Image (tube, rainbow, N blue to C red):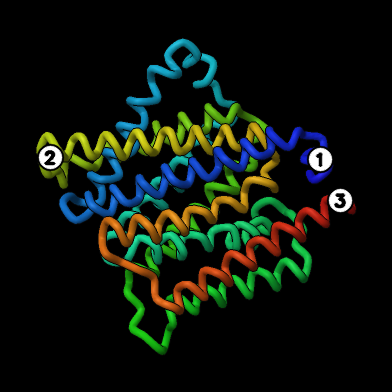
Amino acid sequence: MSEVAGRLPPQKVGWGVFWMCVAMLLLVGMDAIAKHLAQLFPVSEVIWARFTFHLLFMAPLLARRLPLIARTRSPRLQILRGVMILLASGAMVSGLRYIPLAETNVLFAASPLIVTALSVPMLKEQVGPRQWAGVVVGFLGVLLIVRPGIAAIHPAAVIVLLGAGFYAVSQITARSLAHLDDPRTTVFYTALVCALAMTAIVPFVWVTPRPVDWAVMAAAGFLSMTGHLAATKAFQMAPAATVSPFNYSGMVWATLFGFLGFGDLPDGWTVVGALVIVASSLYILRRQRVRRKKE
């Protein structure tokens, strides 16, 4: 992986990093909108709006290539990934209703640690003792944030952690799909599965939006689509090992949007826990690169 990075022009790698930071800005902006909408509408309706408008904005871009992009070698994996993203989104929006944006994003950032742990039983990958140590330290960072036994754990924090687990499974599924389908196919099916599933559910909880609410919902879908496109662009421009650490720039945006939009700032324990999670995740990433060099 590092050899590939070494052969790429520095400017191209730099653009990859740039697009990942843009992706996180857009996706955290979508989370901020979801937090606002979750105070007004049922969680199911917020998720429906996100994925339905995501799909509607995506349709013109895919219209000519839709027959090709809609082809998948593994419909079951595509549906499984869509369901996992749907569950993760539901957990995220439910958490955003009750806990600050920055704290929600920090807890969700535990997903790379869960990916490492689940890659052994699900992908039959080898994880060395140093990587396992990184996973353990990372979860200690999670405990610093939720502080069981010291402070009352808000149930929403547990729900967000469950969402991080669902998101981790979706990432593992995406690894398998990367060898089978075009990335655009995966993005398309994820939005399609989520939109169809929520369309079946949302009539039972429907709250009619005002015109301004429709506009805000559309904005969430637009940010969702452009955020995923920017992330795809980042991985096209530079190796995953180079751009993945910049996922954590989302914590900066979450803190900024949380303060500007909702007057929330993370406390000291949350900041320390976030640093532990980021450091352990980057250590695991480094150990993975070392192991691949040796193979």
**Which of 77/220 is in front?**
220
At label 3, counting other C-alpha atoms closer than 10 Å, the crowd grade (few under 14, some 14-19, many 20 or more) is few
Q: Secondary structure at mark 1?
A: helix
Residue 136 seen in the current view: yes
Q: Which residue is mark 1?
A: 6
**Which of 10/108 is in front?**
10
Which residue is found at the position 60% from the left and 63% from the top? Answer: 113
Q: Which residue is mark 2?
A: 209
- Above or below: residue 196 compared with residue 91: above
Dot in front, 3 or 1: 1
- Pick whichever of labels 2 and 1 is earlier in the sequence: 1
Find residue 202 and report its horizontal and vertical position in percent.
Answer: 21, 42
Mark 1: amino acid: Gly
Mark 3: amino acid: Lys
Mark 2: amino acid: Pro
Q: Is residue 163 left or right of residue 34?
A: right
At label 1, counting other C-alpha atoms closer than 10 Å, the crowd grade (few under 14, some 14-19, many 20 or more) is few
Residue 195 seen in the current view: no
Q: Which residue is mark 3?
A: 293
> Which quadrant holds the N terminus?
top right
Find residue 194 and report its horizontal and vertical position in percent.
Answer: 37, 38
Extreme-front residue of the structure: 11
**Which of 270/67 is in front?**
270
